[in-house]
Image (cartoon, grey):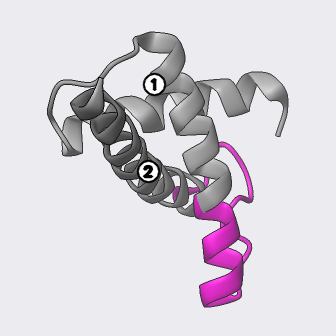
Amino acid sequence: MGIIAWILIGLLAGLIAKAIMPGKDPGGLLVTTLLGIVGGLLGGFLGKVVFGVDSIDGFFELSTWIAAIIGSVIVLAVYRAVTGRSRAHA
């Protein structure tokens, strides 16, 4: 997949992750996209390691989207935990 496809998947996966985990998050569209891209890569890596499948096959593959969304939810949870702690002390 090309860089444009990764950005688009990242944006959509990040938005879906924020819809699954509603709440107030610092950052806007750029942070959502970056979290989604990192989540997609994490989801693909975990799919390969845990299940032994190549979960990032193509843009229109369901496994690509599921891996990206699950990875984005994980990354969003970690992001909230990290930024939540730093804001409490500031």
Residue 36 in the image, given as x and y percentages of width and height: 53, 37
Residue 14 in the image, given as x and y percentages of width and height: 43, 34
Residue 89 in the image, given as x and y percentages of width and height: 27, 32
Q: Is 8 placed above or below 56 here?
A: above
Q: Is 4 placed above or below 29 here?
A: below
Find residue 43 and report its image quarter. bottom right
Q: Is 68 placed above or below 17 here?
A: below
Mark 2 vs mark 1, CA separation in Å:
12 Å
Find residue 38 and report its image quarter. top right
Residue 61 in the image, given as x and y percentages of width and height: 60, 55
User: Residue at the front extreme?
Assistant: 89
User: Residue at the bottom extreme?
Assistant: 51
What range is drawn magenta here?
43-62
**Residue beneath disc 1:** 32
Mark 2 crowd level (few <14, some 14–19, many ≥20, 10 Å Cα): many
Residue depicted at x 53% and y 51%: 68
